[in-house]
Image: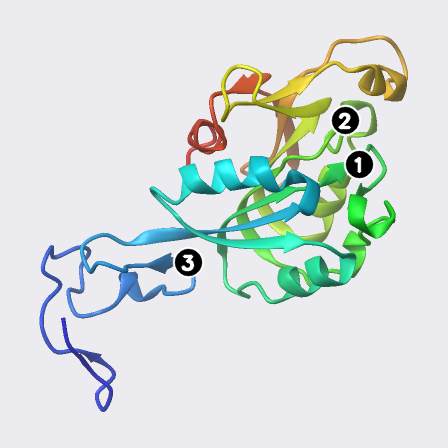
Amino acid sequence: MFYNYEIGRFVNEDPIRDGDNWYNYCGSDPVNHIDPTGYARKKTIYYFYGSDQEKGAYRNIKILRVKYNVIKTKATSRKKLKKAWNNMSNDTIYAVIINVHGSPDHLYLEDDGRKPLGLSKYKIKTIDTLLLLSCNAGHLDYWDSNPAYQLWNRHNIRQLVACDGTHQRGLVNITSISVLESDKFKEYCKEPRSSRGFVRYYKKDNGSLAIEWMKSSYNSVYTLLRAVGK
């Protein structure tokens, strides 16, 4: 396909005739899609991870790139993570994955002295789906104050998946992701109970918050995304 910069459009049809307009690029949404071959557009996922989560993140990203365009950020400091977050699109973002350390109180990076990331200072974004792969960041004993809720409450997010327990990779196979009932999870519990696994925060039709629990293990981050309709 050839693009005419003077008129701002392609001069020949999309060869696969995708969508209603065969002369635009990625459905006129280049922020959330790319089409490197001209035959199939890929949606964009932003992936943030700490340096000590790099191996697991690399495996996840390798799987995701079969279907998605992945923009990755290795967060070695709070400043770098905040800058990358703030530089994301101001339009609706298809999906975001955060893979850093967590607790029922805050998210943190091992490289940055475990200081809280300061989520309240991040620019407000509109996100369809956010996966928060951080230990106990969705702990249900603190459902209205944990990092999952902090992100949900500040940003315009349609659905958010977090861990009610310890996030673990590679238990079932090398790419699997799970939520466990570790001693740390039990320590955080106000009363003895079982982990609910991955939990999903989402908006009801009236805009209010609802929370549901999902499975405790998925074969990969891709299957987790599929489970929430992506």
Query: Farthest residue toward the bottom?
Result: 6
Give the quadrant of residue 185.
top right
Separation (CA) of disc 2 from disc 3: 31 Å
Residue 10 higher or lower than 158, as above or below? below
Residue 68 higher or lower than 196, as above or below? below
Separation (CA) of disc 2 from disc 1: 7 Å
Q: Which residue is mark 3?
A: 32
- Tell me residue 36's x, y (percent): 27, 60
- Tell me residue 168's x, y (percent): 65, 24
Please identify the quadrant where the C terminus is shown.
top left
Horizontal placement of 154 versus 191: left or right? left
Q: Tell me the residue at 65%/39% (across/down).
A: 53
Q: Residues within 10 Å of mark 1 (few under 14, many from 20)?
A: many
Determine whether label 2 and label 3 are within 8 Å by CB: no
Q: Residues within 10 Å of mark 3 (few under 14, many from 20)?
A: many
Mark number displayed over residue 139: 2
* Amino acid under disc 1: Asn
Please identify the quadrant where the N terminus is shown.
bottom left
The mark tally for this picture is 3
Give the quadrant of residue 167.
top right
Determine whether label 2 and label 1 are within 8 Å by CB: yes
The secondary element bearing badge 1 is classed as loop
Residue 18 seen from this side: yes
* Amino acid under disc 2: His
Mark number displayed over residue 146: 1
Determine whether label 3 and label 1 are within 8 Å by CB: no
Residue 169 higher or lower than 35, as above or below? above
